[in-house]
Image (tube, grey):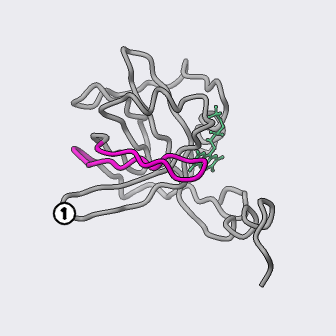
Amino acid sequence: MKKVNTNNFKKTLSKFSTGITVVCVNNNNSIYGKTVNSFNSLSLNPPMVLFSLGNYSSSIKQFSKTKFLSINILSSKQKELSDNFASTSPNLENIKFLKGKNKTAIIPNCIANLECKLIDKIKKGDHIIFICKILELQSNDKLKPLVYFNSKYF
Ligand SMILES: Cc1cc2nc3c(=O)[nH]c(=O)nc-3n(C[C@H](O)[C@H](O)[C@H](O)COP(=O)(O)O)c2cc1C
């Protein structure tokens, strides 16, 4: 075993394969989205999930002040969306967002979508953990997931 530093922390954690989500908020008809793989289920009853966002993120203020948000689980065909929403100024022009019950911005053609209410935020280290209650959801059995492992898409 080695002492932890930023480089070996990143490298070691990259060996944990994940799906990829884009989390979106719609604040006064302005949509903000971020690519996030820190998504996880938290509670079955009530149904809750969580993800964390760096407190240095350009979108952190928008996520911190929202009441509702969408979590869009990407399919294997949506690698470009992952790259797009990992950038500071994602291009939203060609995305035909659907509207959730609470005006959330839902990305079409995902393997699954969740509409959530933000119920808690916990600051830890250089990230904020967002705890969300699921209000509505849908999934598609015919699509395959976009998988991230070793800093590469699969
Ligand atoms: C596959 C993938 C997963 C990511 N997961 C997270 C995450 O869970 N939390 C996070 O804060 N940033 C994550 N990022 C980085 C953000 O998407 C974004 O690049 C970062 O916040 C810097 O951009 P910003 O300052 O405009 O927010 C991920 C990026 C990629 C490509």
How many labels sit on residues? 1
Q: Quadrant of the N terminus?
A: bottom right
Q: Quadrant of the C terminus?
A: bottom right
Q: Quadrant of ligand 1?
A: top right
Q: Is residue 12 left or right of residue 43?
A: right
In percent of width and height, residue 88 lies at: 66, 28
Identify which amino acid the numbered label 1 is placed on.
Asn
Q: Is residue 62 left or right of residue 120?
A: right
Q: Residue at x 27, y 31 (%)?
A: 100
| Nearer-the-camera pick, 6 or 86 | 6
Q: Residue at x 79, y 75 (%)?
A: 3
Task: Give the quarter of the image for residue 34.
Answer: top right
Range of magenta residues: 119-137
Question: Magenta stretch: dominant SS?
Answer: strand
Q: Residue at x 54, y 22 (%)?
A: 92
Q: Is residue 18 magenta?
A: no
Task: Give the quarter of the image for residue 63.
Answer: top left
Q: Is residue 121 above or below residue 29?
A: below
Local crowd size for mark 1, using a 10 Å CA cut-off: few (<14), some (14–19), many (≥20): few
Q: Is residue 1 left or right of residue 118?
A: right
In percent of width and height, residue 66 lies at: 36, 29
Q: Is residue 12 above or below residue 103?
A: below
Q: Is residue 123 magenta?
A: yes
- The residue labelled by disc 1 is 45
Q: Residue at x 51, y 32 (%)?
A: 33
The residue at the far bottom in this view is 1
In percent of width and height, residue 87 lies at: 67, 32
